[in-house]
Image: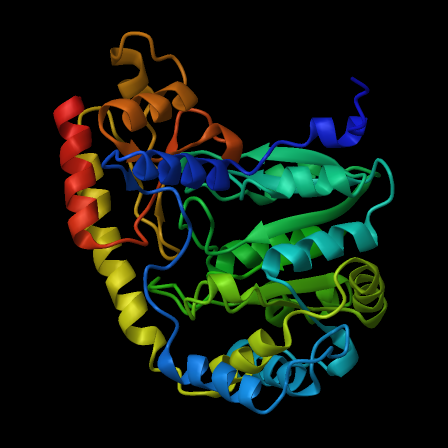
Amino acid sequence: MTDFVSELIKKVKPSATIAVSMKAAELRAAGKDVIGLGAGEPDFDTPDHIKAAAIEAINNGQTKYTAVDGTAELKQAVIDKFKCENGLDFVANQILVSCGAKHSISNLLAAVLNPGDEVIIPAPYWVSYPDMALLAGGKSVIVTTTQEQDFKITPEQLENAISDKSRLIILNTPSNPTGKAYRKAELQALGEVLLKYPQVMIATDDIYEHIYWGDEEITNLGVLFPKLMDRMVFINGVSKAYAMTGWRIGYAAGPVAVIAAMRKIQSQATSNPCSISQAASVAALNGPQDCLVPMKKAFKERHDWLVKALNDLPGFSCLEGEGAFYAFPNVEKVISRIDGVSTDVELSTWLLENAKVAVVPGTPFGAPGHVRLSFATSMDNLNIAVKRIKDCL
């Protein structure tokens, strides 16, 4: 049979997080009692006032195409959010609403990368960054960080990674998978390096911005270095903070020319995001924000419990995070003590088969020897999952 699949697509790996979630779902459908700690999805329901706005939009007939880059109401809500929460000023032609933050990042990479351009990606990284860069014709330059440096890229590492082919760096804070967030001083040190290289764009993935409990107010490079604003793109969305993963709304803010290029790509790929979801997102951004408080409180409580519980397990070493809803322990000592297990990928399979607990291996995040556990689930599930892992070990 003729193989019609392109050589480029053969190089792209499927999403590891989605693959783990699908495998767990398959096992549950087959009657297996599997606890899934793979999905990066809040276990809370979308707040009622947001759902009500969507229902009202349907009843009012807001079921037609919108502008490719989003409704005027939602773009204004995004502009207001950046102004009030981040201290950043944008106008309408600097905003693009897409089908999720993932879509926004994909649009950006396709808009700015030429074949062979380098994208600097600190590791551990969100699993999709390198493959999205590959699809856009770019080459990923992975900068490995360690537990000892809090999984954050240093100014020296950044400077050493920049070459004459460097086009973009992606910073994700708070981080998926580590939960670590860059402090003001750390961002200032990185910004000083980036000022010297005007050919390098900066993409900041802030999707976990509202799930942050660090002891220092969160900030961004744009506020610290206004001179960088003409080459910065800010990526965010409603999925994580407002428990709206299925609604698929993300947004980007940046230079006019870059946003226009991203809009052009979107016009040929998906056209506008769902009109109903856009109406709901207006209510999310403009409505009462107290709905975020109990969710963040629950994530913090789960984080505190899970990190301690993991560190009490033999062979686990887990840092505390400042946000998101993931624990990312080093499990190299666990791997070394189990017969037939030599990698984090094999350990993840072993845990699924023996403990009936689904975790994501660290290798797809650029961090072999680790696993990612999502605590976007109930305390009961976390208790059972840790007990199962402990019993198996």
x then y, percent, for residue 152: 49, 44
x then y, percent, for residue 331: 32, 26
- Which residue shows up at 60% across the image and 61% down it? 100
Q: Please, is residue 290 above or below residue 223 in the view?
A: below
The quarter holding residue 96 reads bottom right
Q: Is residue 221 left or right of residue 372?
A: right
Judge by depth and name the residue closer to the eye, 42 or 34: 34
Q: Residue at the bottom extreme?
A: 60
Judge by depth and name the residue closer to the eye, 22 or 12: 22
Residue 234 visible (yes or no): yes
The quarter holding residue 220 reads bottom right
x then y, percent, for residue 20: 43, 36
Residue 195 visible (yes or no): no
Q: Is residue 305 left or right of residue 140?
A: left
Q: Please, is residue 125 above or below residue 54 in the view?
A: above
x then y, percent, for residue 171: 59, 52
Coloring scheme used: rainbow
**Quadrant where the image shows the N terminus:** top right
Q: Please, is residue 33 above or below residue 292 in the view?
A: above
- Which residue shows up at 42% across the image and 51% down it? 40
**Quadrant where the image shows the C terminus:** top left
- Which residue shows up at 54% across the image and 61% down it? 206
Judge by depth and name the residue closer to the eye, 156 or 137: 137
